[in-house]
Amino acid sequence: MNQNRFDLRAHHSGSTQSEESALDLERSYYGHLNPSSSPSHLQPFAGGTQHSESNAAYFSWPTLSRWNDAAEDRANYFGNLQKGVLPETLGGLPTGQQATTLLELMTIRAFHSKILRRFSLGTAIGFRIRGGVLTDIPAILVFVAHKVHRQWLNHVQCLPAALEVGNFGSSGYVAGGVWCDVDVVEFSYYGAPAQTSKEQLYTELADGLRGSDSCVGSGSQVASQETYGTLGAIVKSRTGNREVGFLTNRHVAVDLDYPNQKMFHPLPPSLGPGVYLGAVERATSFITDDLWYGIFAGTNPETFVRADGAFIPFAEDFNMNNVITTVKGVGEIGDVNIIDLQSPINSLIGRQVVKVGRSSGLTTGTIMAYALEYNDEKGICFLTDFLVVGENQQTFDLEGDSGSLILLTGQNGEKPRPVGIIWGGTANRGRLKLKVGQPPENWTSGVDLGRLLDLLELDLITTNEALQGKENEDKKVKHWISSSCSTITHINTE
């Protein structure tokens, strides 16, 4: 196993900005805010105000006191957990209870993150992979640059076969903790991404998404001044006037080189034909792990989850009759699949998914892992929610598919349920080697949709009835305001 460390920064579809540069930019920006006006805790976006078209979208950052409190809370949390830790296992399996939930796997991984970080490029939680196929054995996946037989490693280079965290009862530590396997997966690292032309498929479906259709909806191409990506979902704000708009990635919608964060379909006027859709109202890039997952997902005080999303309300003069809630190539979709960390691992890992994006159209894949963790060269820890691998060695996404909705395929006649949105992939940076004798495979990273919608205070619109109902509601409000103004004018005239 190669002990050299690399980072797992993914190639962003439609964007060249890395997590670190975006994180530094946001941190620098909020570091110059007046402390008295800064929020006392991390907020996902500016509350109660709407961005004017002359202002760039902005992102809240925690105050110093918040950072110090979080670091102390994190140290206490893992300090208490230390009291019940059981020895690392190099030989046989532990005698405690095998992990069964996402939360248990995340806790075990977080506690042992230091030893895992010494030998790996990153880690994730899921099931052990054998012969390129997921088993039903709960495991922490450890990504390495080169995987070799244990025979060619010395003792200090070997990872434990299993890891365990102590169990606690009402009277304190209880013998026999919770444990899981450790599975080593090879990640073939390519280095810095090469400058290549954007690849895209030319099918009737994909051409329609790029502008040949008369309607716009999930999968359609959306563009800012110099960047294009994919419209993820039609949504409604939970706050203010409850505007209807759409969700895509922040890195697709926001370019801080421009003061006006406007979105178009299919192209902005400077690049080709297109119609103005609206301006970014609120967006987010990162959030601390405890606010995202409800737990500390790692021992590093600087642990951030990639929450790459932006909300763009449709402009008042945009014809809403051109908006659809179905997904081209898929049809009607169900409600959001909310990920409960205390749910069984197989409720998410191993599930089949589909997506529709402006570059690659309709593709299918499998959720291979959750909560992918990796460190940058500055020691900052990043997490991303989903790791998806396409079926039959086919890539799940291409550049330009950022923002695409990830849908769990329907079971027992159910409609496909949205579970996430794509924010990047590794076609130009590296691939996962899942099976001996087979070439490495591309993988795609995604954001947990349920958590992102809560963060941005949005609700998914999945039916034309709900969409039309909101539009009729807006018309009634406008009519009432117009009538009220007319009445007031008449009274003042008299």
Image (tube, rainbow, N blue to C red):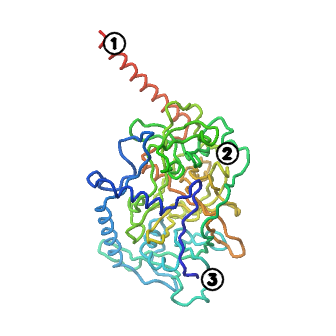
Image coords of residue 419 (percent x, y): 53, 53
Mark toward the viewer: 3 or 1: 1
Can you identify the residue that label 2 sits on? 329
Marked residue nearer the N-terminal end (2 or 1): 2
Compared across the picture, whether 13 is left or right of 41 comes to right
Q: Residue at x 41, y 41 (%)?
A: 51
Q: In the image, which is nearer the foreground, mark 2 or mark 1?
A: 1
Find residue 148 and name its label.
3
Residue at x 59% of width, y 63% of height: 350
Q: Nearer the viewer, mark 2 or mark 3?
A: 3
Quarter of the picture containing the C terminus is top left
Identify which residue, 193 or 492, lies in the foreground.
193
Identified at 56% across, 31% down, the residue is 319
Looking at numbered disc 3 in the image, what kind of residue is underneath it? Val
Q: Contact, CB < 8 Å: mark 2 with mark 1? A: no
Tell me the quarter of the picture where residue 342 sits: bottom left
Given the current orientation, which residue lies at the most extreme left position? 36
Q: Nearer the viewer, residue 315 or 298?
A: 315
Q: Is residue 477 left or right of residue 155?
A: left
Residue 411 appears anywhere in the view: no
* Residue 490 numbered mark, or none: 1
Image-based side of 375 in relation to 207, left or right? left
Q: CA distance from mark 2 to mark 1?
A: 54 Å
Q: Callout 2: 10 Å neighbours few (<14), some, many (20+)? A: some
